[in-house]
Amino acid sequence: MGCLIGSFVLATLADTSLGRKNMLVLSCLSMSVTSMLAVFTTNVWAYSALKFVIGFLRSSIGTCVLVLLTEKVSTEWRFTVGIVEYFCFTLGYMSLPGIAYINRNASWKTNYIWTSVPAICYSIIAYLFVTESPRWLLMQGRQEEAMAMLKGVSSVENGVDLTASLLKVPAKQKGSVFQLYSSIAELFGRSWALKRMVAIMVLGIGIGMVHFGMPLAVGNLGFDIYLAVVFNALMEIPSCVATYFLENCSRKPSILVFSVGSGICCVMCVLVGSELQAVKVALAVASFFSACTAYNVFLIYIIELFPTSVRNTTTSLVRQAIVFGNIFSPFLISAGRKNDIFSYGVFGIVIMASCFTLLGLPETKGIALCDTMDQQEKKDSRPG
């Protein structure tokens, strides 16, 4: 619940007043400090309240990182930096079992400290060395800062590409305190943007249900749960490799192929049953791999669908739709202990059905990012 509410409250601030960098640093630092406070809780109610706050504060971190990275590079590097972000996230995720194992005989509070302190250190490093998105700076009328940043961090080719596109961006006045949430109104004030937002959120629910649900369903495989978790975790790395080779492929077919492939594998898990356990485990792992790959391409696709003025807001909302799809997973997995059709069957049907929304969405491969809603509208209205 904290993540869902936080996505509405915090995400739009990165598009309006605070910017990508400030939102990232403030969210990460406050989340880490709050997590440290959880160590001193004495009852479940105080602990639950702090967990809500932690979820609220962390909701915009992943979005800000991805948006900030992709807005600072040219079109040809956009996909690559996205993969780097996924890979780093995977390394962090895979480090958690190691931390838990090292502290297996210690209190749960020790794990909180081990995970909070590095995040605090990262916040300080990010504040000192990370630069703001030049696109966002220019949208706020801060042209000199944007161009100085480009000269300092970009290569010659990348700088020329970005500078050429940024010079075409009409600067706007920095929003007042009453306009902090103007990106929400800007987004939903245009019918095409609203339809696109609904379509991409539905697709996100389907992909998210399988991407986050399959690791939770390993207990239903009738297989050693530790090995099953290891197999799933290992699939994250080849998924990043597969995503890298999809850079020159169209986004919509890539998402469609891997989503449908994941859905088919889920349905096959139901048909195979428990008689062929090894086959069922292999199908579950293949389904997770396909869902991970579709998820990786999907996140880049979101970035390319919307302009700078609302990009962080839309990306955050879609990521929360992905989380929303995962809300139903525990209930389905519990029902699936008696019959796989309620878990793997539903997973497969939902992810394949959600792909129909791709029919109403445009292709974005190789297209330069837009910065305003008017630019996006004009580009989408061009034939071909």
Image (cartoon, rainbow, N blue to C red):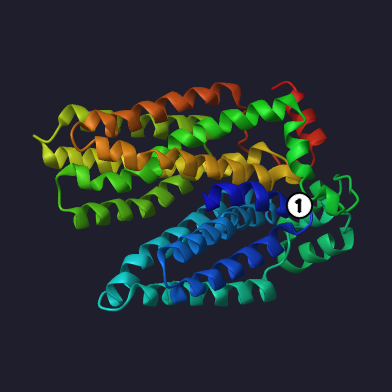
Q: Is residue 274 above or below residue 54?
A: above
Q: Which residue is located at x 12 percent, y 36 percent? A: 274
Question: Closer to the camera, 70 or 155?
Answer: 70
Q: Which residue is located at x 88 percent, y 58 percent? A: 143
Question: Closer to the camera, 53 or 312?
Answer: 53
Disc 1 crowd, CA 10 A, few/some/many (<14, 14-19, 20+): many
x and y, in percent, of residue 166 in the image: 82, 49
Q: How many marks?
A: 1
Q: Is residue 275 above or below residue 55?
A: above
Instruction: From the viewer's perspective, tell me whether residue 269 is left or right of residue 176.
Output: left
Q: Is residue 281 above or below residue 345?
A: below
x and y, in percent, of residue 290 in the image: 37, 39
Q: Which residue is located at x 55 percent, y 60 percent? A: 53
Is residue 250 something one can see in this rendering? Answer: no
Q: Where the C terminus falls, by quadrant?
A: top right
**What amino acid type should be assigned to the residue bearing mark 1?**
Leu
Find disc 1 in the rendering and name its residue: 162
x and y, in percent, of residue 361 in the image: 60, 26
Tell me the element at label 1. Answer: helix
Q: Which residue is located at x 41 percent, y 68 percent? A: 43
